[in-house]
């Protein structure tokens, strides 16, 4: 048993050492996956290791290649569906439809090489994050009124919030993404105006919150969809997740 533990420790040391070297290399990057959009190939909490576009370890970008690219303020790791010149169409494996936005080659940060399955030890070593899944992947809900989440965010330096939403004929002020400032709620985003919001299509929301005024033991996030009540409009929201960095 002692020999087995010693062997595991040696292997783990080599793995961690290799990951550290990759992290320090300018051509290779390690990213923590923060959504389930690539299930079952890649799960939330997995760490993906990407190489440069011209790496001998990959065959370049082609349909079927998994790439990580810049989208707004965040990074997305999705599979390439088709290529037209320098423009890529991408799609998450767990999504029914391609992403409603186009991606250019200049947006691509790396090509997927392999993953390290979710591990609290490795995740804390490289990211210092705690992830909390609020709604199950397939259990969407409709915020006709107000849906409120509360958690202890004291000592947090940032929170990344992600979720999928499917708007149907919503207009400005119909569905608001809000945070509690201690006395009232501040509207951070109007989902009708969120970049790449598309009617009757699943859209991906991901934003990092760094304003310390929200990081208290009484952290509150809510979706205010009260304007939808009595109307023939709706907005499904699914797979709400928080990734907290201490």
Image: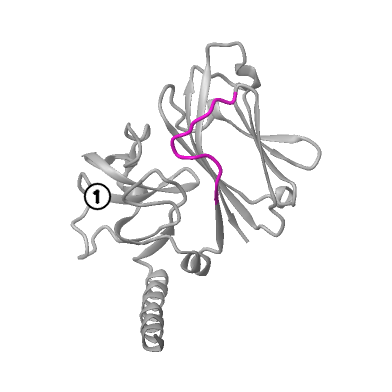
* Image spot of residue 216 (x, y percent): 74, 51
Total marks placed:
1
* Image spot of residue 245 (x, y percent): 59, 58
Q: What kind of secondary structure does the magenta stretch mostly adopt?
A: loop
Placement of 210 over or under 120, stated as above or below: above
Q: Tell whether 84 sits left or right of 216.
A: left
State the quadrant of the C terminus: bottom right
Indicate how the structure is coloured in the image.
one colour
Judging from the image, what secondary structure is the residue with disc 1 in?
loop
For disc 1, the marked residue is: 65
Q: Tell whether 111 sits left or right of 16.
A: left
* Residue 19 inside the magenta-drawn segment: no
Please report the residue visible at 45 percent of the width from the left and 39 percent of the height from the top. 137
The residue most toward the right is 183
Instruction: State the residue in front, 213 or 15.
Output: 15
State the quadrant of the N terminus: bottom left
Badge 1, how many Cα within 10 Å: few under 14, some, many 20+?
some
Instruction: State the residue in front, 242 or 70.
Output: 242
* Image spot of residue 131 (x, y percent): 54, 53
Q: Which residues are magenta?
A: 132-143
Please report the residue visible at 41 percent of the width from the left and 88 percent of the height from the top. 2
Instruction: State the residue in front, 23 or 128.
Output: 128
* Residue 229: quadrant of the picture: top right
* Image spot of residue 65 (x, y percent): 24, 49
Please report the residue visible at 27 percent of the width from the left and 43 percent of the height from the top. 80
Placement of 69 over or under 185, stated as above or below: below
């Amino acid at each position: 048993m002692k020999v087995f533990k010693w062997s595991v420790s040696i292997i783990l040391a080599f793995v961690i050492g290799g990951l550290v070297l990759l992290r320090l290399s300018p051509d290779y990057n390690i990213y923590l996956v923060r959504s389930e959009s690539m299930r079952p190939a890649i799960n939330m909490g997995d760490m993906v290791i990407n190489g440069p576009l011209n790496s001998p370890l990959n065959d370049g970008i082609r349909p079927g290649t998994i790439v990580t690219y810049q989208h707004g303020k965040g990074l997305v790791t999705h599979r390439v569906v088709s290529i037209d010149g320098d423009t890529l169409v991408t799609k998450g494996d767990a999504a029914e439809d391609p992403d409603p936005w186009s991606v250019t080659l200049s947006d691509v940060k790396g090509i997927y090489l392999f993953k390290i399955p979710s591990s609290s030890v490795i995740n804390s070593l490289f990211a210092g994050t705690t992830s909390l899944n609020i709604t199950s992947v397939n259990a969407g809900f409709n915020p006709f009124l107000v849906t409120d989440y509360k958690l202890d965010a004291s000592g947090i330096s940032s929170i990344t919030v992600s979720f999928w939403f499917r708007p149907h004929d919503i207009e400005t002020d119909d569905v608001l993404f809000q945070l509690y400032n201690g006395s009232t709620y501040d509207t951070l985003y109007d989902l009708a105006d969120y970049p790449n919001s598309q009617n009757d299509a699943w859209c991906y929301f991901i934003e990092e919150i760094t304003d310390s005024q929200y990081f208290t033991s009484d952290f509150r996030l809510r979706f205010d969809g009260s304007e939808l009540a009595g109307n023939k409009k709706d907005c499904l929201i699914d797979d709400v997740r928080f990734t907290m960095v201490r």
